[in-house]
Amino acid sequence: MVRSAYSLSGRHGALAGALALATLLGCERAPSPDQATEWTPADHDRVEEKGKKQGPRTTDQVPQGKGDALVELVWMNQCAVCHGAEGHGDGPNGPMTGAADLSKLDLTDAAIASALQNGKGRMPKFDQIPPEIVKGLTQKIRGFRAK
Ligand code: HEC
């Protein structure tokens, strides 16, 4: 994990930022740190390969799959500890903080962005998350509603 975040530098600065964020802010009780270390370096290699063929890459050119993986990583590291893997508010710290069951809420984009930007109740703010990850988290939260 540390090695992969470290090696993502330069033109992958934004990705490195997101990964570093996930690492640095990672709760001590991240549900599956082992899983994260397993797939992150592999993902990194894939991007590295494509990057060589296509030249410098900006964050909005991050392939869909890579973005999804980062969103999953951020969700599992930053959010699931309270909201639970499926957003039901049943993470280890869910009961203690009164984390919302996101599958029961009909939230606007603005409400989700505001919760992240400012925090809400016992939820701390997460104002360092890059916009494209916030977008992915918003889609993920929407997805909980169907379940
Ligand atoms: C420390 C526990 C905790 C963590 C970590 C946490 N939340 Fe929350 N979250 C809460 C609590 C508690 C609420 C309910 C706040 C309230 O309504 O008083 C909440 C509410 C929300 C809401 C609903 C806001 C609304 O307007 O009702 C969203 C969306 C949300 N969280 C998303 C996230 C996302 C995305 C992450 C990860 C980046 C995250 N949360 C991490 C505790 C947490």
Image (cartoon, grey):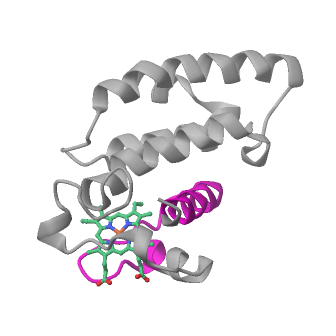
Residue occupying the point 37% across, 72% down: 125
Q: Main secondary structure of the magenta part?
A: helix
Residue furthest to the left in view is 96
Left or right: residue 82 compared with residue 4: left
Image quarter where ligand 1 lies: bottom left
Work out whether residue 13 or residue 145 is closer to the camera in this orientation and state it.
145
> Does the magenta-highlighted stretch encompass residue 140?
yes
Residue 140 locus on image (x, y percent)? 54, 57
Residue 1 locus on image (x, y percent)? 39, 26
Say above or below: 74 vs 52: below
Say above or below: 64 vs 1: below
Tell me which segment is drawn in magenta.
115-144
Residue occupying the point 23% across, 77% down: 122
Q: How many marks?
A: 0
Residue occupying the point 33% across, 63% down: 88
Residue 1 shows in the view: no
Say above or below: 9 vs 75: above
Residue occupying the point 80% across, 17% down: 52
Residue 114 shows in the view: yes
Left or right: residue 58 compared with residue 39: right
Residue furthest to the right in view is 54
Work out whether residue 147 or residue 19 is closer to the camera in this orientation and state it.
147
Left or right: residue 4 compared with residue 59: left
Among the 4 quarters of the image, the one containing residue 49: top right
Left or right: residue 3 compared with residue 11: left
Work out whether residue 92 or residue 56 is closer to the camera in this orientation and state it.
92
Say above or below: 9 vs 87: above
Among the 4 quarters of the image, the one containing residue 9: top right
> Does the magenta-highlighted stretch encompass residue 126?
yes
